[in-house]
Image (tube, rainbow, N blue to C red):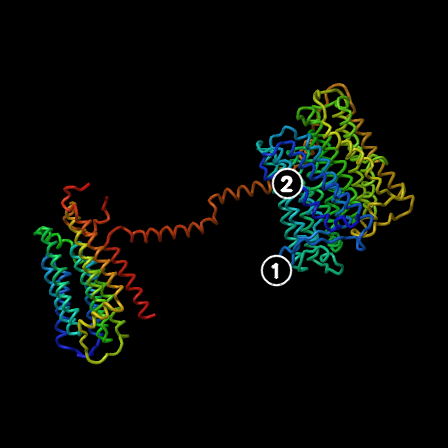
Amino acid sequence: MILNAPFLLFALVAVWATFMVVTRAVAIHALLYLVVALLALACIFDVLGAPFAAILEVIVYAGAIMVLFVFVVMMLNLGRPDRLRENTWITPRTWVGPGILAALLLAALADALAMAPPDGGPVVVIDTRQVGLALYGPYVLMVELASFLLLAGLVSAFRIGRHIRGEDAP
Amino acid sequence: MTAAPAQALLLASMLFALGLLGVLVRRNLLFMLMSIEIMLNAAALAFVAAGMRWHAADGQVMFLMILALAAAEAAVGLAILLRLHAAGRPTLDADTGNRLKG
Amino acid sequence: MLALLPPLAFLPPLIVLCPLAAATILLLSAGRMPAPATRVLAAGAVGLAAVLTLWLAVRFLSAPPPTHRLDVVLWHWLRVGGFDARIAFTLDPLSLVMMLVVTGVGFLIHLYACGYMRGDPDVARFFACMTLFVAAMLVLVLSSDLLCLYVGWEGVGLCSYLLIGFWYAEAANGAAARKAFIVTRIGDAALLCGLLLLATRAGGLDITMLLQPGQPGGPVAEAAAALLLGGALAKSAQVPFQIWLPDAMAGPTPVSALIHAATMVTAGVYLIARLHPLFLAAPTIMAATAVLGLVTLLLAAGSALAQTDIKRILAFSTISQLGYMFLALGTGAWGAAIFHLVTHALFKALLFMAAGAVILRVHHQQDIFHMGGLGRAMPGVFAAFAAGAAALAGLPLVTAGFYSKEAILQQAWHASPLLWAGALLGAFLTALYISRCVFIVFLGPVRTAPTGRTEASMAIPLAGLSVLAITGGLIEMPDAIAPVHLLFRLLAPVLGPPPAEGGAEGGAGLLLLTGALAPLAGIAMAWVLWRPRAGTAAPAAGELARAARAGWGFDAAYGLLLVRPFLALGWLNRRDLFDRVPDLLAAATRWGAAVLGRMQDGRVRRYAGWIAAGTVAALCLAVRP
């Protein structure tokens, strides 16, 4: 296994930040850790030779989707009682079962990695042009499907959030 | 750096396991949604790593698909969350979801 | 013209089809058919079968096939390994005689039933069962394969059950039907076991194959014969299975006449006669048949002497006469048994129908001690009943019963004088009880005034059977009177040559004379005991009479020995031990469902946990298979 210093650094940051996301009691802290994790992931993408994915990760994920989360956290108007409640909900006992399950999953996946294919030589950067050609070449149908999915998400989010204040709720 | 997918895939596995841990442990729907985002990212990382190994653009195409999926999921999930909050469930407790009505 | 005639092989299936089609139509009509159409259809179908049988008989006898048999294979039923069962009919003299009896007497009884059942709301169901019975009985006597015969055997049993319980609204009738069905079922089980034994030994149930000479004897043959005998005993109501027949009188009188006197109960006799080589290979079973027949005939005659119900008298008389047939079978006199079967069918059907006519006229009164002097009010019925009674008693020379009984007595003498003496005592008792019945019912003071008149549809069969009951015996006579041997010679290809009337001419004559005197003595004694007197007659009191009236306590003994323990066993097992096993399975399923159901408690996180657990398990399997 060849260890690469930037990769290792970003991986450690990503795991650490993710662990913090899972364990935080304050929503906005968790969110910020999540942004850190996503940024670390974007750096990893770049290291792996996927600059387009890295940029998208920053713009769409850390930018757009996380901002959506932040807006929602603001609207929820969370405060001290919520933090205390989170602490009462996360007792040491609740960690046991999910911990075992997650460990088992990790063990199974790591075990499966023993069958990983051999290395494929030096990393080659796959630039935006190649991705675009693939996207609108063989994967054009999937783009359409993704647009359907986004449209569906849009419509349902609109429908669900329409009477959010209950003013004209039936 | 050589294109060794094993490390990247191990990282993806760890992130996925952590995300699963979050989904199972947290009772607050907001944190569950965040954990789900983590799991989706882990899957995306696996795709990108595979694309790196084979020097193909397909991995990043799949990343784009996951991005679209995550966006749609976040939009719907957060809308439901707000709706629940407005409907008198400010705790966003997932364990009381079985008492939903109407 | 000859070319237009259907081939002979076409007729037997057609004859079976006539009543079967009528039964099917009647069953499917579900009682919506108007009553006159029902009557015409049923009687017409059986009448057509009778006419066709007559035609068949004429053609068969005028130009008999070289082997005296006609095989009609309808289709192969099943072929499993070496076992081959066919739906096939064999027409030979024995089955021809049985067919003549079944369709001839059957037609007359159907005609009679048209009158007897007038006004009954369920007449369609009645005739459906009756015609179905005729079809099943024809299958029974025609089958050339024992499995096919068994179908007919069970079919007649079913019809018997349905018709005994015809008036099912009364609980007692249903109980009688169940009793008949269960008791005969015991014998059916024995018969089935016997058939299986034969099939495993011979590899098939074709009668011709089973009866080929050179079959091994030994214990297996004895066991098979014993099991077949068990089936025959139950069907023919012989000791120890005789208890069902008296109760079977709960059915309508035409049913008693057709099923429980003329045809179905003689199925056992037919079976043994048909399979007689199997019994010849088992001498102890033959001896047992003879002894059981004798015991039955004496016990039933004794019971008949004490009965007060006219139909029960005739029922016990039927058992007793069937005992004669079994006695004949046991002594190897197959021809005599069949001869008595034929004459008995004639005169017993006549007696039942005459009794039915009497019962209708005296408002369904069946106790003979409430009848009396009916001879003046209904001379025609009296004459018919008297003819039947005379034939039953065996009035010398002028009745059918005399000749058939004589044939049996002769054979019994040759087998063992002891059997002969018993049979002679039976003849005396027969004459005694039936004369008692005649004297009490038709002579003396009137106790219940009869009303109405007997219909023509009932009178015609009575008249026809009266003639047959008197003259039916003339087809077969002892040498001492006239050397007429029509029946025995006809049956010879099937049953072997008739036994020579051995002994000196004088010895045979003496036997004949003794046999003729016994019924006369019985009638004379009946006249002494029950001749018409002023005052009221009453049934005999006393221990012996009571025991005889109760059928010698067989019912009580079986109740104590079999029914009660069985019921007790059933009570002990009322929670049904064997159901516990499936219950265990059900409980396990329910428990598993409860466990799995707790997974579905509506908590999203649990669902996610289960999904993850399943995924992990699948992943482990996929990675390290």
Q: Amino acid at mark 1?
A: Val
- Asked if residue C84 can be seen in this view, the reply is yes
Which residue is identified by label 2? C23
Query: Is residue C339 placed above or below B51 in the rendered structure?
Result: above
Q: Quadrant of the N terminus of chain B?
A: bottom left
Marks 2 and 1 on same chain:
yes
Query: Front-most of C262 and C241?
Result: C262
Residue B62 location, quadrant: bottom left
Pinpoint the chain carrying mark 1: C
Give the answer, above or below, for where C164 lies relative to A115. above
| The quarter of the displayed image where residue A32 is located | bottom left
Residue beneath label 1, please? Answer: C80
Check residue C441 in the rendering and tell me which mark sits there, or answer none. none
Query: Of discs 2 and 1, which sits in the foreground?
Result: 2
x and y percent of residue C303 in the render? 71, 34
Q: In the figure, is residue C340 to the left or right of C185?
A: right
Viewport quadrant of the C terminus of chain B: top left
Subunit ID for the residue under disc 2: C
Residue in front for this viewpoint, B85 or B66: B66
Is residue C428 in view?
Answer: no
Which amino acid does the dot numbered 2 rest on?
A: Ala
**Cα separation between marks 2 and 1:** 32 Å
